[in-house]
Image (cartoon, coloured by chain):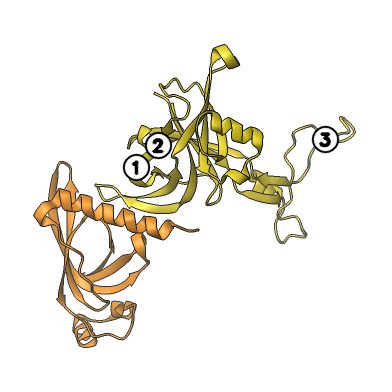
Chain colours: A yellow, B orange
Amino acid sequence: MTAAILGKKVGMTSLFTDKGAKVPVTVIQAGPCTITQIKTMKTDGYSAVQLGFEEIPERKVNKPLAGHFAKVGSKPMRTLKEFRDMNVDFNEGDEITVEQFNIGDKVKVSGTGKGRGFQGVVKRHHFKGVGMATHGQKDRQRHGGSVGQSSWPSRILKGVRMPGRMGGKRVTISNIEVMDIVSDQNIIIVKGCLPGPINSLLEIVKR
Amino acid sequence: MNSMPLIEEMLKARAIDSRKQKDGDNYVEVPSFNPGDQVNIAVRVVEGEKERIQNFKGIVLGIRGGGVNKTFRVRKISNGVGVERVFHMSSPMLQGITVLRTGNVRRAKLYYLRGMSERKIRQKIS
């Protein structure tokens, strides 16, 4: 069965297993999400389920979007995301919660990673730097070295790794284990760390 | 808003509940103790299939960390060799802690006891 939900990263802590091992975990405030639209092969050319997450006041949505929510009898939501091929028996307007996941499930979590700004090659591409501090060398401990050849091809090849903007991109982590679920508080706890800062949006998918 | 402290509290309560359920009457709450106290710690040791309780008796050298990361360090002299062990305060492997004698010390971390003879330690902490 496919399960998907939207959530917010709350923070990290640790849990003890029954065997006494301490495991790092991330706490996610997930759902409840409303199904705002179901797309089918017949009407849309592909099958997907659109989920809405986090209620917002009516005044924050424009009229077309308000209509979209009113159609399924849902309150306005901050985020709308589609999940392909959910093949689950749901109707539009239904609410889905963390209860569709079980402890021990392997899930895939996606989010936007922390933006690192303009970074050099050592941090961005794990280069080792060029030179040493002594032996007549100067100012090149964190440099990238040569970026190409000489008169042929007389240009730098495309895709050469260089300094630039780092992070702030979508990151997906697969095969993370669900450690605990607190359904009355809509909390799902997974093993290990997740992309993005605290309060950032996360998509949790089980295939 | 940072709701992490609240959630940690809740997780702690849940962990205690589940342990109470599992251990039944065997569940013992962790008593409060201080550096310098002589304590006996019952630790669950799993050896293959079997499980038994191992006791570790010694002096608390210090307590560090907070929340789930709170640990304490116990030192004892075993066959003339100093042995130190760090325990997690909220570990489910701890079966019980008993305070045998309270110490009278002025410091939070008693690392200076390491170089001392047993006799001197006894004088220092009482």
Report helix, strand or loop for mark 1: helix
In the image, residue A185 sits, relative to residue B70, either above or below, namely above
For mark 3, does the 10 Å Cα neighbourhood hold few (<14), some (14 to 19), or many (20 or more) residues?
few
Tell me where residue B40 sits by quadrant. Answer: bottom left
Residue at image position (46%, 36%) is A33
Same chain shared by disc 2 and disc 3: yes
Q: Position of residue A101 (x, y in %)?
A: 37, 34
- Residue receiving disc 2: A97
For mark 2, does the 10 Å Cα neighbourhood hold few (<14), some (14 to 19), or many (20 or more) residues?
some
Residue at image position (36%, 57%) is B8
Asked if the residue under mark 1 is in contact with the one under mark 3, i.e. CB atoms within 8 Å, the reply is no
- Cα–Cα gap, marks 2 and 3: 51 Å
Q: Position of residue B3 (x, y in %)?
A: 44, 57
User: What label does residue A156 carry, if any?
Assistant: 3
Report helix, strand or loop for mark 3: loop
Counting residues from the start of the chain, the first of labels 2 and 3 encountered is 2
Front in this rendered view, residue B30 or A123: B30
The reply, left or right, for residue A20 in relation to residue A192 is left
Q: Chain of mark 2?
A: A
In the image, residue B90 sits, relative to residue A127, either above or below, namely below
Q: Quadrant of the C terminus of chain B?
A: bottom left
Counting residues from the start of the chain, the first of labels 1 and 2 encountered is 2
- Cα–Cα gap, marks 1 and 2: 8 Å
Decide if residue A127 is in sight here: no
The reply, left or right, for residue B121 in relation to residue A59 is left
Which amino acid type corresponds to the residue marked 1 in the rendered image? Ser
Q: Position of residue B30 (x, y in %)?
A: 21, 65
Q: Chain of mark 1?
A: A
- Cα–Cα gap, marks 3 and 1: 55 Å
Asked if the residue under mark 2 is in contact with the one under mark 1, i.e. CB atoms within 8 Å, the reply is yes
User: What label does residue A183 carry, if any?
Assistant: 1
Q: Position of residue A154 (x, y in %)?
A: 89, 33
